[in-house]
Amino acid sequence: MPKKLTPTNSPHLPYCHACPNNGRGRIADSGPSTADILFIGDAPALDDFRRRETLSGRAGKELTFQYLPLAGLQRFDVCVTNVVKCGSGTTDDIPAKRLEACADKYLYDQINRMQPKLIVPMSSAACRVFIPGIDLELDYARPIETRWGKWSGTVFPIYHPNAGLGMTENISLVRECFEQLGKFLSGKQAVPVDEYPEPEYVLLEDEDEFSDYLWSVYTGKDFDRVAFDTEYVPTRPTVIPHCYSFSVTPGTGCVVMAGNLNLSRRINDWLESNNFRIILHNAVADLDPLEAMGITFPTTSPHRITDTMSQLFIRSLPNSLKVAAYRLLGMSMTPFMDLAVTHSKPAAVKYLELVASGIFPSPYPPGSRVQPIHKKAASIIKSVDKDSGFDPWKKWANIDPLESGPVTRVLGPMPAPNVSHFPPNILTHYAGRDPDATLRLNLLLEQNRGFENSVPKLQRV
């Protein structure tokens, strides 16, 4: 156990009301206070308390001897601090209010005095101080210009050295962060830019439109592959196919609805007659829905399938389609839930309105003070009206199944966030972008078989 800690008498760091330790256990920064580069972690770890210095334990050794040299830096070249200056010796689940309080109380003045040329926040918590809402999985090791207080400059978000201690598979991720930092400092880092900023995604409704599309993309070009993706509505015990999409050339994508079987048979005949290679991202998830919608060629010709998720995995690259497309191609892709929640909420509210207007049997004895379910539904509707970010699904899920059971038996389950609620234009862009990204990734990976942390630009086909 560490020794009992007492408050320091530093005039620069009086503890604030948000500190659970009343200022006990304050940890000194590491490195010169005039350094040009400031590394910022989230909070001191237990080893830091024992040694009374920031990042002085196992993670600190990794930083000093493994990671900083990858960026061409030495420990005495940089200053290392934390957003939280004191605490309980754990960095797990630090409340956002406490991070904000510590940043306002200490970090704000420290950065204004120091005026570093580069700030390197380590961990999601530290990054959110400077870039609220940042998704570190997408934006790690990418320079971001920002302003914070009287300081303005470049923030270079990375993962904390601690990430490689708990999970060895994260070591390569942390190494990549510092390798990219070294390239940035030497002016050699290349951040990919979307080569097709105005893509063409269309909803195909008949065979004539399909023929017109082929005529437009085939002129003067030779293709040997088609990328596919599927969208479906999750149900129990199976799924309901909603649509599929395909791309034969970068920057384009076509969407076909599940019920359009005549068009699907025409597309399937086209695939078979040309003996195309089929590119999928996570083929296991797409093969059954494709077959159910009439695209049987991939199932009957499995030797012609290439899975980009596997291609990325064996190269130790991000294998999430959204993350890989952004980091390797510069393609921004809207997260599914952002769209699904927005466009599915009206269906959920309509369901709640039916519940609020009906009388359902209560599992509780007469005279019970428990609010009846129709009033609970009305209360959820009011909350949605007051707050656009309110989650009606979470609130409904918290209701005792004994109460919601009679409603479910009559009305079925509450409509979940899913693609069936997307307007046609939103669906076309969302669904069309997936095979476009899949095709571009496949082309990029085949052009760069010795892919090693470089991100060359995709050439136009």
Image (spheres, rainbow, N blue to C red):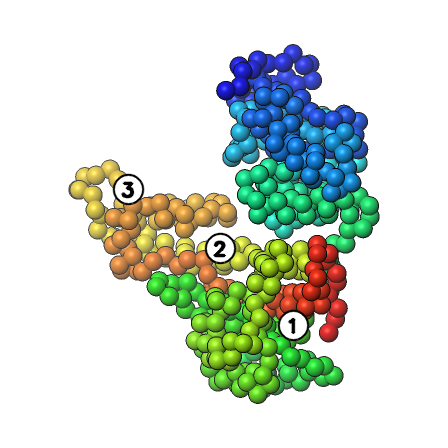
Residue type beneath disc 1: Thr
Give the mark, 3 or 2, whose residue is nearer the N terminus: 2
Q: Residues within 10 Å of mark 3 (few under 14, many from 20)?
A: few
Identify the residue at horizontal 52%, vertical 34% (top origin).
Answer: 92
**Where does residue 67 sit, x and y in percent of width and height?**
69, 40
**Where does residue 243 sit, x and y in percent of width and height?**
49, 72
Identify the residue at horizontal 57%, vertical 38% (top origin).
Answer: 165
Give the mark, 2 or 1, whose residue is nearer the N terminus: 1
Residue for badge 1: 252
Residue for badge 2: 341
Mark 1, secondary structure of its residue: strand
Q: Residues within 10 Å of mark 1 (few under 14, many from 20)?
A: many
Residue for badge 3: 371
Q: Against 155, is 206 above or below?
A: below
Q: Foreground mark, 3 or 2? A: 2
Q: Quadrant of the C terminus?
A: bottom right
Q: Are marks 3 and 2 in contact (CB under 8 Å)?
A: no
